Amino acid sequence: MNKSLITVGWREWVSFPNLDLPWLIAKIDSDRQPSILHTFLTKPFEKNGQAMVRFGVHSHQNDRDTAVLCEASIIEEHNGYNADGEKESYSFIETTLQIGAN
């Protein structure tokens, strides 16, 4: 694994190759642990005894018609509150993030 550091701006082009999620603009928030991916139609399910989550991502900013449906293994779940103060369940996944050009 390459341990060299790179400099990133507050907005960067990123992709999630393990999710077949193409390039999108991400806001880089160094104070946020863990990182959050805004999703919709989030639905937990089970596959071969493994907890999974299926979700949609709008891959183009301000374009609600273009979406990619993804599926990933859940590594952890937590309850919390969304920006509107409503209780929500959060599924945590682990995936590869690619920043900038290869």
Image (tube, rainbow, N blue to C red):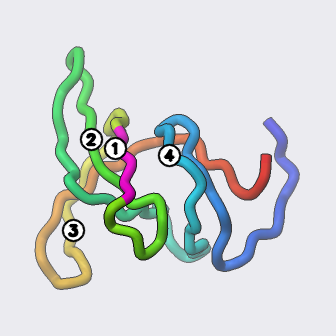
The answer to whether 88 is drawn above or below residue 78 in the figure is: below
Under circle 1, the secondary element is: strand
Query: Which numbered disc flags the more N-terminal residue, 1 or 3?
Result: 1
| Residue 33 locus on image (x, y percent) | 49, 65
- Which amino acid type corresponds to the residue marked 1 in the rendered image? Leu
Magenta span: predominant SS is strand
- Which amino acid type corresponds to the residue marked 2 in the rendered image? Arg
Q: Residues within 10 Å of mark 3 (few under 14, many from 20)?
A: few
| Residue 94 locus on image (x, y percent) | 47, 42
Residue 87 vs residue 65, the one in the foreground: 65
- Which amino acid type corresponds to the residue marked 3 in the rendered image? Gly
Q: Which mark is residue 54?
A: 2
Q: Is residue 16 left or right of residue 51?
A: right
On whether residue 67 falls in the magenta region, the answer is yes
Residue behind mark 1: 69
Q: Which residues are magenta?
A: 66-70
Residue behind mark 4: 21
Under circle 2, the secondary element is: strand
Q: Residues within 10 Å of mark 2 (few under 14, many from 20)?
A: some
Give the residue at x 26% y 41%.
54
| Residue 38 locus on image (x, y percent) | 37, 64
Query: Which numbered disc flags the more N-terminal residue, 3 or 4?
Result: 4
As measured in the structure, the alpha-carbon distance from the residue carrying label 2 to the one carrying label 1 is 7 Å
Mark 3, mark 4: which one is toward the viewer?
Answer: 4
Q: Is residue 51 left or right of residue 8?
A: left
Query: Which numbered disc flags the more N-terminal residue, 2 or 1?
Result: 2
Contact between labelled residues 1 and 2, with CB atoms less than 8 Å apart: yes
Give the residue at x 23% y 15%.
48
Give the residue at x 83% y 61%.
6
- Which amino acid type corresponds to the residue marked 4 in the rendered image? Leu
Q: Which mark is residue 80?
A: 3
Give the residue at x 26% y 24%.
50
